Image (cartoon, rainbow, N blue to C red):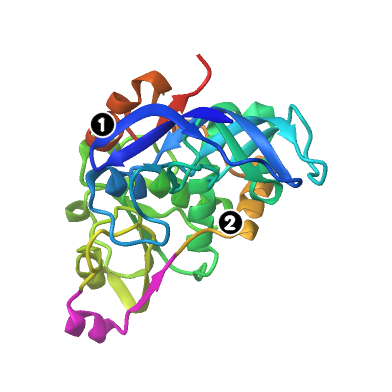
Amino acid sequence: MRTDAIVLEEPRALGVRQVELTEPGESDVVVDMLWSGISTGTEKLLWSGEMPWFPGFGYPLVPGYEGVGIVADAGPASPLSRGQRVFVPGATCFADARGLFGASAARLVVPSQRVTPVDEALGERAVLLSLAATAQHAISSSPQAGPTLIVGHGVLGRLLARLLIARGDEPPTVWESQRERQSGSDDYIVCQSTDDACSDYATVFDASGDVTVIDLVTPRIRHHGEIVLGGFYAVPVAFNYPQAFMREARIRIAAEWQPEDLAEVMRLLDTGTLSLNGLISHRADVRDAASAYEVAFEDPRCTKMILAWRH
C-alpha cells in the first residue's frame, strides 16, 4: 500500500508526498485518518532542525502523534472492527521514511493495542488526547496541597489548569508573556510574571519549553517546592545552583504519558469533569500543510492547528 503523508525531507523542507506502507499483521488495524494535530513542541524542533538526538530520529521523517481516524480494516487477531473511530498516538509503518512520530498520513498501519476507540461526539477534539494525557502524567505524581503555578498558556498549559481543577485543586495561576495567549480562561488567573506577587508556590509546571524557567521560578517557590519540567528542550537545561540550593528545590521531569494517564483522561471526559472545548484555534486542509506548519509555529494567536485529511 501507498499513501499520502506529510514528510520532513530535511529541516524546513516539508511537503505532502506518497510513501510506502508496511504490510499489516494479524493484530494490526489499517486506519484512514480524519484529522491530525501539529505539535508546537517536538514537531517545531524537528521542523527547525533544533531537535537533539532522539531514538529513531533522522530525515526524511513523518511527524505527528495526534491523530484521529476510522478503522478501514482489522486483522483477524484484532479486537477492533471496521468503522470504529480511534485515536492514534503515532505509527512506524513507513517503508521509505522514518516514523517520528508518524501519525501525519492519510492511511496508517498500527498495532491494535496502540489505538484507543473514541466517541464520535469528540470529533476533531480527539486529536488533543495526547496533550491531555501528557498533562495528566505531569500532575499525577505531584502533591495536591498548596498554590500552583503554570508557566505557559498554550494548549498544554490550559490542559494542566483544567486537570488540576478537575481533581479538586485550587485554581492555579498561569504566567503567559504573550498577550495574544492571555485570554481563554474564566476559571483561573492568567498574567505576566511581573504582575504576580506570590512567592509561596508549592508546585510549578513548565509548559513553555523555556530553558531559563528554573531560574525564573525558583524565587517564587516555597522551601521544598517542586518544579516540573513538562516541555521539551532543545538545549541543556541549566540553573543557578545556590538559588535552588537555598530552597531545597525538587526538580522533576515529566516524560512520555502512559496508558493509565490516557485512561484517566478518558474517564474524566466520560463523566464531564474535563472538557476539550475551545482549545483548537486553527484548521487547514492537508494540501496547505506547509503554510499551516508555519502558522502553527510562528503565529502566537495559534494555540492548536489541526489538519483535515478528507477533502
Vertical side of 262 occupied by 306: above or below: above
Which residue is drawn at the image coordinates 58% and 43% (left, top)? 274
**Of helix, strand and loop, which one carries label 2?**
loop
Q: Which quarter of the figure has residue 28?
A: top right
Residue 250 covered by magenta stretch: yes
* Residue 169 spot, x, y in % from top left: 52, 58
Q: Nearer the viewer, mark 2 or mark 1?
A: 1
Residue 39 covered by magenta stretch: no
**Of helix, strand and loop, which one carries label 1?**
helix
Q: Which quarter of the figure has residue 154?
A: top left
Image: magenta residue range: 239-254
* Residue 215 spot, x, y in % from top left: 20, 69
Badge 2 is on which residue? 167
Q: CA distance from mark 2 to mark 1?
A: 36 Å
* Residue 192 visible in the picture: yes
Question: Mark on residue 294?
Answer: 1
* Residue 3 spot, x, y in % from top left: 52, 28
Vertical side of 77 occupied by 256: above or below: below
